[in-house]
Image: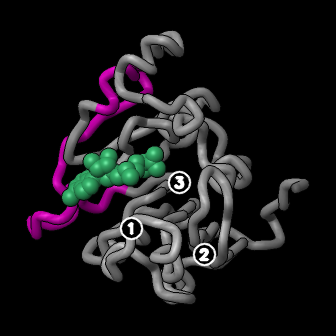
Amino acid sequence: MSYEPEDELFAAGARDLHAMEPSRWVARFTHLVRPGGCVLDVAAGRGRHSRWFLDCEYSVLAIDRDLSGLRWLSEPRLEKREADLEDGEGWPLGERTFDAVVVTNYLWRGIFDDIVSAVRHDGVLLYETFAEGNERYGRPRRPEFLLQPGELLARVAPRLEVVAYEHGYSDYPSPRVVQRICAIGRGRRLSQCPLAAR
Ligand SMILES: C[S@@+](CC[C@H](N)C(=O)[O-])C[C@H]1O[C@@H](n2cnc3c(N)ncnc32)[C@H](O)[C@@H]1O
């Protein structure tokens, strides 16, 4: 793949290279994504997860309202889509489904059902973002950007099976309260999902 050396990456806007590491939650469950499959990176930002999955030999569709953070990343297996997911125009990807849908540090409840529907029948949803309690530590503080206790569980319940779920305090990469879930499509069995050693 042809991403730029780390100093160019830094110049491209990744002021904190640490911030370009994949979420540990995402990395922990990547082995559940079908090898060589296609991953949707929702609100991809600077592309830390797009890069992660490309490095792991997946194809990626990165979607964001502002693709400037992804300029540094160019590779035939990467498709970039500029779209405002909150403009009320509807989900821009139609019925397209993915082997994995990844959402981190982003919450817009209006597209929750679309995100869940975009997970293939045997695919994986990896979602991690700020949750109630984060107000004590910093932004985001507004309720519309913070998950309520159990909210991810409730949102996925009709269509997906939960492999792992957490809501709590983390001091990594900075003090915060997060909620995260790994859930699979019902075309797959929990007993077929090997749990990674922690
Ligand atoms: C905090 S960043 C998270 C980036 C990435 N998911 C990560 O964890 O590294 C939030 C991202 O959401 C994108 N975003 C915010 N509002 C959006 C909208 N209405 N439609 C599409 N993307 C949006 C921003 O452009 C930004 O890239």
- For mark 3, give the secondary structure: strand
Work out whether residue 138 can be spotted: yes
Q: Closer to the camera, 36 or 182?
A: 182
By secondary structure, the bulk of the magenta-drawn segment is best described as loop
Q: Which residue is mark 2?
A: 186
Magenta segment: does it hold 94?
yes
Residue found 35% across the figure and 73% down from its top: 145
Residue 94 is situated, as x and y percent measured from the top left of the image, at: 24, 60
Mark 1 or 3, closer to the camera? 1
Dot 2 amino acid type: Arg
In the image, the segment drawn in magenta is: 69-96
Q: Earlier in the sequence, mark 3 or mark 2?
A: 3
Q: Which residue is mark 1?
A: 140
> Which quadrant would residue 172 be assigned to in this image?
bottom right
Whole-Å distance between the Cαs marked 1 and 2?
A: 33 Å
x and y, in percent, of residue 191 in the image: 83, 71
Badge 3: how crowded within 10 Å, few (<14), some, or many (20+)?
many
Other residues around mark 1 within 10 Å, as few (<14) / some (14–19) / many (≥20): some
- Ranked by sequence position, the earlier of labels 1 and 2 is 1
Q: CA–CA distance between discs 1 and 3?
A: 26 Å
Residue under label 3: 100
Amino acid carrying mark 1 in the image: Pro
Horizontal side, residue 85 vs residue 109: left or right:
left
The percent position of residue 82, horizontal first and vertical second, equals 20, 42
